[in-house]
Image: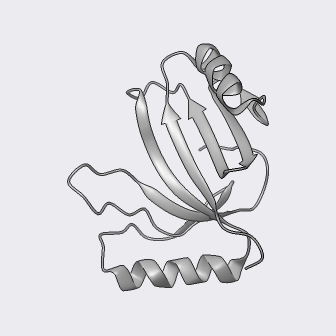
């Protein structure tokens, strides 16, 4: 692995425009993607893929993830999660990435999924 994995953080927000302004000021950069209900920043220092969306969910932490660069890293993460003996959901291939598993280790279930980004556009079913 040449570079460390990228942490993925996704927050649900109630006012997308206001939060884009806030996080753009905080990160001192504009988002790399802006859509009607979604924005994300691909930061290198720290290595974070930070996204916000206003899709009618309660504001706050929506889900976490670890973005990897190669299929080998993805497979290693999958094995690590299998070894962790935590409740998981079956792996799936999505339009935006290969999600291994969503882990819910605590009482307050916050989905966390390692993934490899396959395309740059966002598609939902």
Which x, y percent locates residue 103? 38, 63
Above or below for 70 versus 42: below
User: Is 39 left, or right, of 16 in this rendering?
Assistant: right
User: Is 64 left, or right, of 118 in this rendering?
Assistant: left
**Residue 36 in sight:** no
**Which residue is painted at 53% across and 25% down in the image?**
54
In the image, 59 versus 90, the foreground residue is 59
Which x, y percent locates residue 74? 62, 76
Above or below for 27 versus 94: above
**Which residue is painted at 77% across and 45% down in the image?**
121
Image quadrant where residue 92 sits: bottom right
Count every numbered label the image shows and give the total.
Answer: 0
Q: How is the image coloured?
A: one colour
Which x, y percent locates residue 11? 50, 35
Above or below for 15 versus 67: above
Q: Quadrant of the C terminus?
A: top right
**Residue 40 in sight:** yes
In the image, 68 versus 118, the foreground residue is 68
**Which residue is painted at 74% across and 70% down in the image?**
3
Which x, y percent locates residue 70? 73, 75
């Amino acid at each position: 692995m040449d570079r460390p994995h990228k942490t993925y953080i996704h927050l649900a927000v109630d006012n997308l425009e206001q939060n884009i302004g806030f996080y753009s000021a905080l990160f001192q950069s504009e988002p790399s993607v802006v859509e009607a209900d979604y924005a994300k920043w691909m930061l290198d220092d720290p290595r974070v893929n930070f996204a916000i969306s206003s899709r009618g969910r309660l504001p706050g932490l929506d889900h976490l993830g670890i973005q990897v660069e190669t299929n080998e890293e993805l497979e290693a993460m999958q094995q690590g999660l299998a070894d962790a003996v935590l409740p998981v959901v079956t792996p799936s291939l999505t339009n935006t990435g290969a999600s291994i598993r969503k882990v819910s280790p605590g009482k307050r279930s916050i989905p966390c999924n390692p993934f490899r980004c396959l395309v740059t556009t966002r598609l939902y079913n």
